[in-house]
Amino acid sequence: MKNITVRILLVVMVITTFSSCKKSFLELNPPANLTPEQALRTEADLLVALRGAYAGLRSTAMYGRDQMVIGDMMADNTYQSVLNTNRYTLFNNYSYNLTDGNVSGLWSTAYAIILRTNNIINANVSGASVNQIKGEARAIRALCYFNLVRYFSRPFTDNPNGLGVPIITVYNADLKPGRNTITEVYNQIHTDLNAAYNLMTTYSNSSQFSKFGARALQARVFLTQNDKTNARTAALDVINNGGFTLITAAGHGAYWANPVIRTDRVETIFEVSADAVANNAFDGLSYIYSQAGNYGDMLCADDLYASFGAADVRRQLYATGVRGGLPSVFVNKYPNFVGDHSDTKVLRLSEMYLIVAEATTNETEARTYVNAITAQRGASAITSTGTTLFNDIMAERRKELAFEGHRYMDMQRLKLDINRGANYPAAARTIAYANFRRVFPIPQTEIDVNPTIKAQQNPGW
Amino acid sequence: MRKCLIAFLCGLLVSFQVSAQNKVIKGRVTDETSNPVPNASVVIKGAKAGAVTDANGSYSISVPGSTTTLVFSSLNFANQEVVIGNKTEINVQLKASISTLQDVVVVGYGTTKKATLTGSVSTVKAAEIENTPFTSVDKALQGKVAGLQSVASSGQPGSTQEIVIRGFSSISASNQPLWIVDGIILNTGDISRLQTTANILSTLNPNDIESISVLKDAAATSIYGSRGANGVIIVTTKKGRSGKTRVRFDMEAGKSDIAYENSLYRPLNAQEYLDLSREGLVNLGASPAAINSTLASLGLGNGVDFNWYDAVTRIAGQRLYNISLDGGNDKTSFFISAGNFFQEGTSINSKLKRNSFNVKISNKTTEKLTIGVNMNGGVVSQRAPLAGGAFGNPILSAYFLLPTRTPYNKDGSYNLISSTLGGLHNTIALSDIDRRFLREVSLRGAANAEYKFSDNLKFRSNYGVDYNTAEEDQYNNPIHGDGQATNGRAFSYYTRYFNWTFTNTLDYTKDLTSNGDLSLFFQAGLESQKSAGYFSSLRADQFPPSLTLVYPTSGASPVLSSATISDYTFDSKFINGNLNFQDRFVFSGSFRRDGSSRFSSANRYGNFWSLGATWNLEREKFMEKFTFINQLKLRTSIGVNGNAGIGNYDSPPLYGFGFNYNQNPGSAPTNVGDPNLTWELNKPFDAGIDLSILKSRVNITFDYYVRKSEGLLLNVPLSLTSGFSSARRNIGSMENRGIEFEVNIVPVQTKDLRWEIDFNYAANRNKITSLPDGKDIGNGSYIIRVGQARLTYFQRVYAGVDPANGDPLWYADTTLTTKTNTYPGAGARVLVGQALPKFFGSFSNTITYKGFSVSAQLYYNFGNLIYDTWSGFYLGSGNGAVYNKVARQLNRWTKPGDITDIPRYVYNGNRNFQSASTFNLAQGDYIRLRDFQIGYDLSKQELSKLKIGALRVYVRGSNLVTWVKDKRLAFDPEQGVSATTNLNVFIPKTVTFGLNVTL
């Protein structure tokens, strides 16, 4: 009896042992993830990965908010209300430091998007739309490098051989790269944009890069390099061959109020989409400008508002009121933060006209192209010549592209001192071109882990 | 798996056999002064069930003819064994004990006599954790065990508690101990995903716990292999004792208030704030017109002076009811309890309610087979306000909202206009209108069987389930607050963990010599575990205006619908044994092989072991002359155990989804991954002494330990240009070295008066010994650096205020020689101290005179610094100008020559004064009256008149007095192990009145 029991029990123990030792018991796959090999196997997979790269552009650190706000705040267009949620205070005061979260946010987010595009561009996948997908990925990568090199390096127009940013085109987690030169970075951008222009054949909608989206970005890149001939050529290519049309004065208000991505090729060449589900909520662009929510910290500089003529339809994008006890001008360029959110305009046809106007050596052509814009805004036509004409074009550029992240970049490429109005703190109204804070520091987090780049910090930091 | 269990139980059923021929033995049990000992247990040696003495100490027990020995035991008395022989009446006089070698200690996969214990194990008894105002047992453990640091970071009822035993073993993986309740390996920690905090252990009623063993060294913890590195806490719930059914009833009610407040951190009133702001605007250089209009916008002249701090904090209430029944006969015993507990936090919108039960039944089916089931469960409802920088956090509003802003309109209705609240949220209205709610249901149940093949061979099987669910609901109204932007929003999250452990052990004991001098204990075991997590999350926006429609079903725009799972498995084999020579020398050893789903197949298995030895010197001939020594035990152990406390899917390189665009799916790389990832190793060494002298009136335990962690599961920072910020790798090492000291003294022990003193002390030195390439790793306020402790602050040193102009000054370099008024670069940061205490412990006194008792426990903690996260806002000399400030800001510099540490107040900030520096650090040293209790137990005469078994009434105070060394300390010195404040619900001090009755 006893022996039988012992045997039965031993058998049970053995069974138990094996039942729990089956290999599959310890073999658990992640339920919501794939390995990189599984995730990039087909053409359809690449399309999914491409959307991931676009979604990266929507991050708060990129076109979700920071690039647009900082690009105007570090210049003279937008300032922080006395009644604020303490966002961008240090940019308003020009006292941001090495550990600033917005600075490291741009650095890390841009490179995270670059990784997403690298994996697409390097994927060994064939299919009818692979070229289009890879072309879009290249345009996105170019856009990221363009933003990185403009914020973290002195302007190309200053010293093309200065330190740019590290160029990473192949994933290697353990790499500690040093900085390439500014020229090398711009060459990389052109390589990508030329490839993108040649690879892409499809126009999907305003929220995706197209052939002429890549060309439009390239026009801006050339202008940033002060390569006016190529800038003009590229911009004209977009204007003449892209199939886009300018918004009219009558359609101007509706254009900015519209939260939906477009397929009609009106005005928008490329924008970053935020929809009703995928958006930055409180940390979005609309929320920081609109007075209808809880924030509304960012206001329009008085001198900018004053520069709009009474009949200028753009003036209607601004409202006057009182905030923090002070008369203030509110920005309504991004009104939608409920439901489908306002998208972030990255490239517009109007900019191409302004690029031609600025880049051309022919003053008649310059006036023609800038007045194509003024005519559609209810603004008076520009008739000036010489330096005045240039200044008038720049003033028009400020008015047209305000709150779209351009202003500071213009001051950089033109190597201008920034003179901010009385809306800004007294200690931060004149920002000389030589001020070291005109160039972001390589973030402390990068310096801490990357010995190569440690010795390549920007001057002053 | 379940099939196997059934097969196994069937196997056991085959073996039923019963033998009869009983006889009855009667007698009386008394103490050394011949008073009767009621409720003493009388059992046949080797059996579990038996008889219990009545109020006169009398008993009667029916025993089989084969029985040779009876064992008599009772709380606070030494066990006594009596050989039956031909006797039918056995009277026994029990000797008082505090701690003896015969005490049984719960250890991994069984129990052991203290004499044979080679490891370092501390035990906590039921009486120490019953009826405390703490919502979970981990909170109640503070100060009870030397070397166990238990720290709260929030006074929210049901909040998590961090426990660190013998220092941090890991940098990036878990540092929390393994919890085992009645043989079930638990999922512990924070179950909340939507709410602020929800401690799974708060579903376990501390009153249902009989004992807790805290396993600290290799000999004790290595049997838990890959999860032993951070120590193991074994909880045994209450079980029934045979005899007359006892009914116990506990009730308690009390009030609590904030435990620590510093008048320097009182938020300013309207006049103070406006005066300061005017000064700040003048210092900014604003024009008189601008000053007046800005001040008007801040509320100048509106006549409002509202104290938000007072409005969001409160005197909170709490109550507790417990009822339990236990009893049984010589075959079956049972314990059943039910509990109801309610506690409010010290701020609005903070409360917890728990209903709990515990059932434990044990049946001696045959002479050889004992089966048992137990089930323990709790239902917790909790409301926890937002914490940290959230505008909806009531504590934030206490410090940020201006006294010139009012939460009420003139007609008494809520003010819901953000612009009239400075853009902040009316947390008083929101705590009424919005919903934040969590309900947890937890069940811990096990079925077990023990079969004795013979006196020396025993098989035991335990299948246990740990089931936790959390339902979380949140509603933010469309009018004001976090829901305004989306025209209202509501969330509903569901979380479930189904976690089972199946353990089978075979125990074998054998006398290796015929005289019993040398004996062997050997155990072999198998254990498998699977935890299955299930998570669903949804959210809808766009709500109808009615504020009563609070669930997502009413929202027009479903913006989140997500569900996923997360599982892990462990599969283990272990052996465990010891060799005992006359209870003088004992050698122990253990080995465990663990496999885990968390690592790739190449590195799935790990081997863990320990060796231990003890020498009970008092048993030696040469010690006989030292009659005052009752126990002198030397013990030591070494071994290896592990830490697998990382995410379930951290090992493979991964792409994640949810990076969607235009509502089409998008993907992106989410994990660097490392296919070679494996266990973090922990190698503890321990040497200890247990000394008991003067009739066990003085008991001392001392331990010295060194534990080395190697192959840390470290998040190694990467160059951000890779697209990732860090990768988890097995690299780096760390060491903890420390001493622990526990003293128990009974200076007075007479018939009526007893005075007992307990003291414990632990000092730990943590040191990182290697890192990748020896390089520092930045870590927020801290630095991870070779040679330094984990959580060492690395900060710019604040050098005070320039008396000439009121500018803040910092040291410009690490030699602290040059001062500058420009916020220095990262190169100026220096090591300034650590978040972990250098030493901590407790000191308790209990005096009992007849029925009266007074006890007090002081908890102390020394040698750490606390970082005040939000100081830059309420004490930033003008930073965050539109938020309120605290009284300490009034000490600002105002004129040349002023000597102060607070710079000139400039509207919108003075030269980055608000940025991180040592200004934000304060010393964390404190002593707190953790527990104070006055009670009265009715005498036997009074009890017999009332015809009840026992009755006790008491008043208890918790955290009544807190002494801090640093008078600049902003908030409670308990701010989590990382010692960082975060505007959490304040930790309470509590006074309760209670009554315990046993029928």
Image (cartoon, coloured by chain):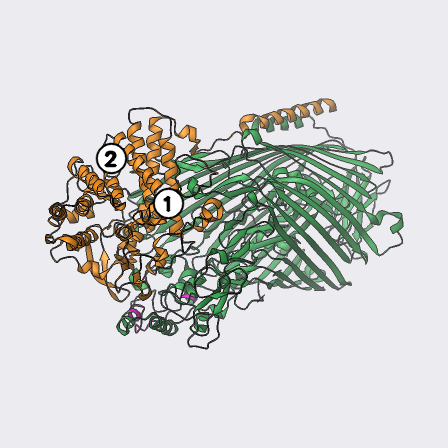
Image label count: 2
Instruction: Decide: few, some or many residues near mark 2? Use Cα within 10 Å; few <14, some 14-19, many ≥20.
Output: many
* Residue at mark 2: chain: A
In this picture, is B799 found above or below A370? below
The magenta segment = B294-309
Mark 2 or mark 1: name the one nearer the start of the chain: 1
* Viewer-closest of B746 and A276: A276
Position of the N terminus of chain B, as image quadrant, is top right
| Residue pointed to by mark 1 | A164
**Residue A180 place in picture, x, y as percent:** 39, 42
Left or right of A196, for residue B501: right
| Residue pointed to by mark 2 | A210
**Residue A172 place in picture, x, y as percent:** 45, 36
Determine if the magenta segment contains residue B449: no
**Residue A195 place in picture, x, y as percent:** 29, 32
Q: What is the quadrant of residue A231 in the picture?
A: top left
> Does the magenta stretch mainly form a helix, a strand or a loop?
loop
Check if mark 2 and mark 1 are on a common chain. Answer: yes
Q: Is residue A439 visible?
A: yes
Q: Please report the residue visible at 66 percent of the width from the left and 23 percent of the height from the top.
A: A11
User: What is the three-letter code of the residue carrying label 1?
Assistant: Gly
